[in-house]
Structures are given as structure tokens and as C-alpha cells.
Amino acid sequence: MARVRCITEMGMGVDVHGKDATKAASRAVSDAIRHSSIGFFRMLGKTSSDMFVDVTIGVPDPGAVDTSAVAKELPYGTVTVTAVKGGLEIPAESGGDAVIIANAAVIVSLDDGAAG
């Protein structure tokens, strides 16, 4: 089996208060897919359950992301979420709080059906 990349979407999400990296990451994924309606799978004899969806989330503290919660933003396919160092943290003027900005790359692939 070889995967063929079909779609690459990017998104950004923000948690303004609370330093919640998972909330920012979920919003980034939602932003990436919000305007997508993918219909070409039927032409290939595939369904939405045939999709492989690989998500990379960039946040200042990758360990703070609940990847299972972020995966729930995606309604179809076999979903894998990986958090990596990236994004941005903007400390509050008074300290203690911060704005967390997450970036998401959502890549959708299909099996090309070729023996590998």
C-alpha cells in the first residue's frame, strides 16, 4: 500500500485566556477544515472512511496537547495527531496568563491500491 497525498490544509487557532494548548489546537484544525467539502472520493470509488488524515499541530508546549481531543475535530477517516514544538505564546502584561497560538497542517491521503 502506498498513500497518495490528496489534500493539504492549514489552519490557526487561538486560546486567548487560560493557556489551553488543546483548545488552540482544536480551533486550528477546525479552521483548516471549515471551508472544505471533499467530493472527489466517489469518483475514485472511495468513501470518507478510506481517508488517512495526518494532523501536525505546532504549539509552544507539545506535551500540553490532548491529541485524542484534537482528533475529534475530524469527522472522517483514520486520524493521527502529532504535536510538535511551534506556535506562539504571548504572555499577558500582568503575567500568569498568556495567549496560545497553534498552527495545524491537515494532510488527507488515500491508499493507491497498488501492491507494495
Image (cartoon, rainbow, N blue to C red):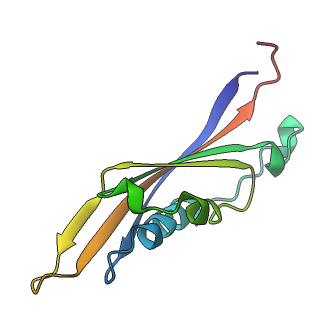
Q: Residue at x 66, y 49 (%)?
A: 79
Residue 35 can be seen, yes or no: no
Q: Residue at x 25, y 61 (%)?
A: 88
- 31 and 81: which one is in front? 81
Whether residue 23 is situated above or below residue 66 in the rendered picture: below
Whether residue 54 is situated above or below residue 31 in the rendered picture: above
Q: Quadrant of residue 50?
A: top right
From the top left corner, tell me how far across and down residue 52 is, in percent.
70, 42
65 sits left or right of 59 in the view: right
104 sits left or right of 73 in the view: left
74 sits left or right of 77 in the view: left
Considering every residue shown, the one lying at the far front of the view is: 63
Q: How many numbered badges does the structure rendering display?
A: 0
Q: Residue at x 45, y 64 (%)?
A: 25
Considering every residue shown, the one lying at the far bottom of the view is: 94
Residue 111 can be seen, yes or no: yes
Whether residue 100 is situated above or below residue 7 in the rendered picture: below
- 33 and 54: which one is in front? 54
- 25 and 106: which one is in front? 25
Query: The C terminus is located in which quarter?
Result: top right
From the top left corner, tell me how far across and down residue 92 is, in percent.
16, 81
From the top left corner, tell me how far across and down residue 3 is, in percent.
68, 28
Q: Quadrant of residue 62?
A: bottom left
Query: The N terminus is located in which quarter?
Result: top right
From the top left corner, tell me how far across and down residue 17 is, in percent.
31, 84
Considering every residue shown, the one lying at the far left of the view is: 93
Considering every residue shown, the one lying at the far right of the view is: 45
